[in-house]
Image (cartoon, grey):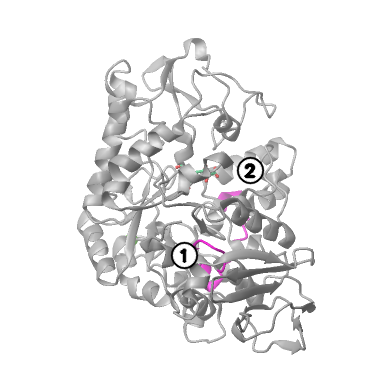
Amino acid sequence: MEKQWWHTKTAYQIYPKSFCDTNGDGIGDLPGIIDKLDYLKDLGIDILWLSPIYCSPLADQGYDISDYYNIDPRFGTMEDMDRLIAEAKKRDMYILMDLVVNHCSDEHAWFRKACEDPEGEYGKYFYIEDCPDGKRPCNWRSYFGGSVWEPLPGHQDKCYLHMFHKKQPDLNWENPKLREEIYTMINWWLDKGLAGFRIDAIINIKKPLPWQDYPADRADGLCSAGEVLKHADGIGAFLSEMRDRCFLPHGAFTVGEVFNEKPEELPDFIGDHGYFSSMFDFNETIFGGSGNGWYDQTPITPNDYRSCCFASQKKVGDIGMLSNIIENHDEPRGVSRYIPEGECSIPAKKLLATMNIMLRGLPFIYQGQEIGMENVEFQSIREVNDISTLDEYQVARKAGLTPDAALKAVNRLSRDNARTPFQWDASANAGFTDGTPWLPVNRNYTRINLASQKNDPDSVYQYYRRLLALRKDPRYAETVVYGDLVPVFEDQDRVMAYYRTSAAQTLLVIGNYKTEPQTLTLSSKIRKVVLNNLPQLKTEGDTITLEGYQAVILDVSSDS
Ligand code: TEU
Ligand code: CA
């Protein structure tokens, strides 16, 4: 694998709406992000991915774009955006925007023109079909529930496709004119100085045509979008065209949100000349999923988490670099998901950080992860904002769960868990806003906030700073960034351990994922304890005893 400038970097996802509000309207904004650049630099962050801030009705929190060339006034102005890019550059930081081009908003001018003249030029930017008597072209289910077909406004005998929300009409990538519009927009942003993009739902842009039903997987007679994706071939033509027309000429960094990729396609996706620079590892997030819905998802155990991480590492090997996460804006908080209920201690949060950040690949920290933010606890479905969660609540209720059981089931996986405001301090609204936050702050903000951790050497925040620094420490960087990953102690219950090996060095990363101590026999001498989430490490001869949720990084390089 060829070395790239971004391999040594660390990335951070900002969900702008919940990051920092500077004008008291309860919505995070660009000036708030600029104010926090030094905080992020000090944390050890190089690359910033901003979830969408383009003009949008926010039906799907900005993933429904009504103008690709303008910043939504709720987040700020284009001058603010230019200032953010410039201020980041001054700090050797890089800005990624979210590229959402599987669909746009139904309030985009293109869709409005399509509704005026479905047979005209803009009608061909979308998938518009004749739907006499409401008959739908196929039985696909939207990610947000219900049919993917919606009556075209003003044309009851026609319908349009939306894989996501009905306010997110899919763009027709089979239309070269539409693709040209997209490439022009991408290059316009790259010419403004963006370092690249996170690429949203991009695997959805290729539909299996002509329209056809697939076996229904629920009583509603529909089939999942995931099932549809299995039948779509030829996406490479679009992705390679986008790479060659946009990303390559700008040397852009791109990370794909790719689900359901075909294993044999991996080199095409993230190899040296792949469509993208990297793609997220979602193996852990999709574990235990059920076609019946979130209520039926099997919780992931520590041993499952270990297996998922190692399977992804094995699958990718030296083909390219994965982007590793424990959470993002679509997922529950990682510490609430990957640490068993009742065991979510500070050492456990640090252990999870160690296990994930030390994997081979680019770490993507999600805002608030660095201070150990946890899931919210909904008291009522009325507290829920997320359209996906609201849909899954109805799915659970239709499956027979009581209101309380359905709420508890969707709370575990709700996207709102990651969308509550960043908890800066213990003041009103956790210092996020002087106004009323668009989504209530997690009630635990007086216990979990940055201010209480900033100057505490034993805090989760300070541990993240030490952990991230290893990627830039000349003593360890080559091994941490490029070292092979070799699992070890895989048969030891609730121990996650792996070597990171380079020509000159071997590091051993070990986590005791139990509350009780575990003793392990090492096959190599400990040269140095590089990092420890507890003050001490018990060793005796070639054994070590890890306390409950103790994680260590050991230099076990041989003398030769
Ligand atoms: O998500 C794409 C997606 O398919 C999964 O994340 C998931 O199925 C979806 O979030 C429903 O739970 C991307 C964005 O990350 C997400 O926030 C948007 O809602 C979606 O695309 C549509 O743009
Ligand atoms: Ca604001």
Classify 10 Å Cα crowding around label 1: few (below 14), some (14-19), many (20 and above).
many
Q: Residue at x 52, y 29 (%)?
A: 232
**N-term mark: 2 or 1:** 1
103 shown above or below 32: above
Q: Secondary structure at mark 2?
A: helix
Residue type highlighted by circle 2:
Tyr
Could you tell me which quadrant the C terminus lies in? bottom right
133 shown above or below 495: above
Classify 10 Å Cα crowding around label 2: few (below 14), some (14-19), many (20 and above).
many
Observer-nearest of 501 and 255: 501
Query: Within the magenta stretch, is there residue 370?
Result: yes
Q: Please provide percent x and percent y for residue 558.
A: 63, 81
Tell me where the magenta segment starts and ends, as one range.
358-383
Q: Please provide percent x and percent y for residue 50.
A: 38, 56
Q: Secondary structure at mark 1?
A: loop
Query: In whole angstroms, how far apart are the C-alphas of marks 2 and 1?
Result: 26 Å
Q: Please provide percent x and percent y for residue 283.
A: 61, 51
Question: Which residue is denoted by mark 1 in the rendering?
Answer: 367
Going by the image, does 328 lie left or right of 380?
left
Q: Please provide percent x and percent y for residue 379.
A: 63, 57
253 shown above or below 123: below
Contact, mark 2 vs mark 1 (Cβ under 8 Å): no
Question: Which residue is denoted by mark 2 in the rendering?
Answer: 393
Residue type highlighted by circle 1:
Gln
